[in-house]
Amino acid sequence: MFRRTLWRFLTQSHMPNAGAPTAGREYMCAAAVTTASSKTASPEGAEATTETVAQTEKTGKMFITIRSDSSRRSSKIPTVFAEPVKRIIFVRSGKSLADVDIGAHVTTPDWRISIVPEGEEECYRAGRHVAEMVGDEPVYFYFSPYLRSRQSFKHMLRGYDEYRSEHKMDGNSIIGVREDVRLRDVDIGRYRSKDELLKHLREREVYGRFYYRFPHGESGADVCDRVTSFLDAFRRERLDFAMDTNVVILTHGQTIRMFVKRWFHLTVDTFHLMKSPPTGSLSTLTRLHHRSCFRLDDRCVEVMNLPLSLNEYNGYKYRNKLLLGSMSTGAPLM
């Protein structure tokens, strides 16, 4: 009886429409209650009233309760909602003193290394590019606490504001700005000389970038844990964003590579073959039509040396099931 009643409820089109328009921050997952009643015959031959109650909460989960006389049974049914984030734009911080001379890590704490004039121009152009891309759509910025990242953010905002002013875009489209410590660069430790630093960098290439831990520093796996923590929080925070919000994440090369690895569930072997995007460049994840699926731009796929099948979910998932077995997450291999 429970299954029959549940099926009748599902065929009555009580589920919210994923393509329905939204107003401001009111999503289709706002609290809604639907009730349906039916009469069924009990095993004893007497009629019993069965009531189906469906409630959708702001958590995005629909709860269905079947009430039949004094008995009660419930079942959870997943619902489909429109994804509020339209783009996730990763911006690598501008060219720094350490990019010019790796020895800067010996004389200056990593978090205090600043960008050079060339890096300022890179970030200025990146800001103009972001403004051109998003138009009047809302934008939320996240950035790393390192000095070079904060300086990059300053010059990126300069380009962003100048582009909007030149094209007479009214209003303030920036809905939030946040510094997040989880977006910092990998900690490579402390060294007394440039030769000592270069020695450990060579060891990392031999041992593997993901697993190698710098003395008094971090491994790639540590960065992966930080990125995972950020993404877990981001998935909750994005529910408060207005529809078609653009998220800009200003961070560092290895952190961007780790974001791509975690987002697409890439294997560690694939991560070891990846390359960082150029300083001041944009790498964009674009939402597929009102779904929680995103596509990485083809230029970034090529620059980061990613599998060409990265954006073909069914293709690489099927291939890796054959290679890795039925328990594979579908992570693409090189």
Image: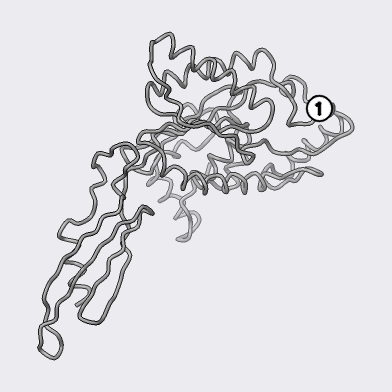
Q: Say which amino acid is labelled 1.
A: Thr
Badge 1 marks a residue whose secondary structure is loop
Colouring of the image: one colour
Furthest residue to the top? Answer: 166
Residue of label 1: 108
Where 78 falls versus 271 (above or below)?
A: below
Which residue is located at x 32 percent, y 47 percent? 81
Left or right: 111 as drawn, with respect to 1: right
Left or right: 83 as drawn, with respect to 122: left
* Horizontal and vertical percent position of residue 39: 11, 76
For the question of whether residue 301 can be seen, the reply is no
Where 297 falls versus 67 (above or below)?
A: above
Q: Nearer the viewer, residue 331 or 93?
A: 93
Where 243 falls versus 155 (above or below)?
A: below
Q: Nearer the viewer, residue 269 or 167?
A: 167
Where 117 falls versus 9 (above or below)?
A: above
* Horizontal and vertical percent position of residue 32: 26, 55
For the question of whether residue 130 can be seen, the reply is yes
| Local crowd size for mark 1, using a 10 Å CA cut-off: few (<14), some (14–19), many (≥20) | some
Which residue is located at x 79 percent, y 39 percent? 189
Position of the N terminus, as image quadrant, is bottom left
Q: Quadrant of residue 62?
A: bottom left
* Horizontal and vertical percent position of residue 226: 62, 46
Which residue is located at x 49 percent, y 17 percent? 160
Q: Quadrant of residue 100?
A: top right
* Horizontal and vertical percent position of residue 270: 57, 43
